[in-house]
Amino acid sequence: MTRVIIVDDYRHTRERCAQLIQESGRYEIVAEFANASNVELPCMSGRVDFLLMDVCTADGESGLKMAEKLKPLYPNIKILMMTSMPERSFSPRARAAGCEGFWYKESSVGLVDVMDQIVEGKTVFPDEGELPNVCLGRINSSDITDRELQVLRLLAEDKSYQEISAEMGISVNTVKDHIKRMCAKTDLSIRQLVISAVEHRLIMPNY
Amino acid sequence: MKLEASYFADLGGIVALAALYLAFFYNVSLKLRRNRGWKSISFAILGSGLQLANLAGLIAVFNLRHGSAETVWNAVPAPPIVRQFLIAEGILVSVFLIATGFVVHDRRKSAQTLTTDSIAEAVMNLPSGLCFAAADGRIVLSNTVMRSQTMRITGKPLTDANEAWESLLRASQEPEETCTDSFLLRDGGQTWVYRREYLEIDGKQYQHICSSDLSERVMLVEALRTVNDKIEQQNKRTRRLISEIIIKKSEEEILNMQHRVHHDVGQCIVMAREYLQQPPSREMLLQAIQRWEQTFCFHSDTPQTQTRQEREEEICQSAEFMRCRVLFRGKRPETESYYLLYLSAVREALSNAIRHGKATVVYVDGVQEKRMLEVVISDNSSVRVNAVSEGVGLSVLRKRLEAAGVQMDIDTRDGVRLRLCFPNEVKQ
């Protein structure tokens, strides 16, 4: 029986996940936490095989940051990150942290199926088409390119054009070009665009 | 010659010594059989020589004291016929004793040696069925159990192994559970498993058929299956009950939320109406604005925060994994941002206490001192340190605390104590 800990700030989500997982009969829920900071000691105890962890957990604690911390220390514990946020960087970050999977809560793929595959030793990450979409002005978030989104993310972090160009290794003019293109596509001003992206959780710099 | 008491005493001594000598010789022979090293052989020769010399010496002394054996014998007061009878009886008894000794020795030897007969006897008396046959079915060796089972089940004597196997397979009546080289067969109240293997000895093919009694194991498996079924039923009932409880709780929560929304929004509307009817004081206006903000922030889609008790319980639950208890005592910071820092400090101290001090209890004591809240985090660790080097966790915590104006000190005088001073707590 695989021993699982569920971390999610919403009690209903935790309970629903626990119910689904327990119904399979292959997993045992050993604990449920709302805050990702609390999983460190259970992992240290060696009584956990699987972490099902939300990216955004209680009190603003990031599940991803916790996964980045735990994975090198406890490589045998399988970690499946989950979220309902449309933030695109979560999945690649989870992969880079060494997590075995990433699951969108609205995904058509069942949670238990994903967990089964991970327990079998596979890694499960969503395809491009599975990314949640939000509306930004006239377009969907999927119409924004990764580079444009990166510029938008740095703008949301209150970086200047010079800082953005230095960080991305491009010229200031290219930064301005990206911004112009986004504004033209969405029919929004740059300020409206940043606000809209943060409001729709396309950009979540704190996690 | 007159027989004296000393004669019988000396004779008894010789007989006892002779018996001792025989016992010694027997032990030496057993030892030699196990170990034929030069030490054992030397010991046997020397010991036997000494014993024989001792015995010969004693017989010589006896002769010197009592005359020759013939003289002694003639002195026994008995008629000649009785003497002859005694001689004959003595010879017979000696022969009988020697013969018995040989028989006993042979029996012991045969019991310890593997022979064709002993193997055949063991095979015959095996509690399991056993049969070795050539590839064409000709029986090479079969035991009583196998023969009697075959006769009872198939109604034919065991003459051809292939034919018997086919008949037993048909009698098993469980074709769906069988494979060609193994099947289960119910014989009366017993369950037997039959297995067939092929061997190659000296280039010739043989088949080895064996049957074992699985009745006890089958009974145990059936009992276990019954228990598992019961447990599965109970689990189903429990899961159903849990689902029902969750649904009930959700409905209850939705109702509570609806009630709260109704109540809070209603209060806001009443306050707004009062304001519109007669403009209130500045304080009342601020109160109304605060009320509106609180209400609509609470009912917006921001994640619901846990209560303080839930947060502390979660830390305790986490510590329990490491068999450690956390005791929150006294005051906690009132301000939310300070309270979050307070919990971060508890987590860090708890982790260090378990990791480095093997602590089983961690105490978190908060004391209000004038306008400042002092929190001391200590533990029951027996590990004593002179100084604490701040790792990544502690230094990050220190930065976060100091950025918020909270003072952090580490005291190592009586165990490791983390002291936090939250300023202006009352004012906040």
Image (cartoon, coloured by chain):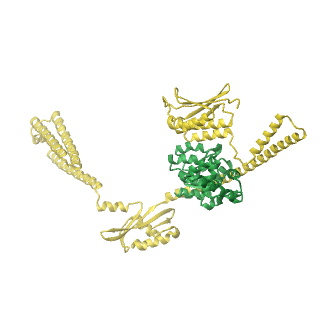
Chain colours: A green, B yellow
Question: Total number of numbered labels?
Answer: 0
Q: Which residue is drawn at 52% across and 45% down?
A: A46
User: Relative to residue A192, is residue B166 depicted above or below?
Assistant: below
Q: In which quarter of the image is residue A125?
A: bottom right
Q: Residue furthest right?
A: B277
Whether residue B217 is visible here, answered yes or no, is: yes
Is B49 left or right of B165, judged from the image as shown?
A: left
Q: In which quarter of the image is residue B51?
A: top left
Question: Which one is in front, A90 or B242?
Answer: A90
Position in image of residue A89 (x %, y %)? 60, 53
Q: Residue furthest top?
A: B370
On-image quarter of the N terminus of chain B: top left
User: Relative to residue B110, is residue A206 depicted above or below?
Assistant: above
Position in image of residue B365 (x %, y %)? 62, 30
Question: Which one is in front, B170 or A202?
Answer: A202
Is B345 left or right of B51, judged from the image as shown?
A: right
User: Relative to residue B295, is residue A116 depicted above or below?
Assistant: below
Question: Which one is in front, B413 or B82?
Answer: B413
Position in image of residue A29 (x %, y %)? 60, 49
Position in image of residue B372 (x %, y %)? 66, 27
Q: Which residue is drawn at 83% across and 35% down?
A: B284
Whether residue A25 is visible here, answered yes or no, is: no
Q: Which residue lies furthest to the front in this view?
A: A173
On-image quarter of the C terminus of chain B: top right
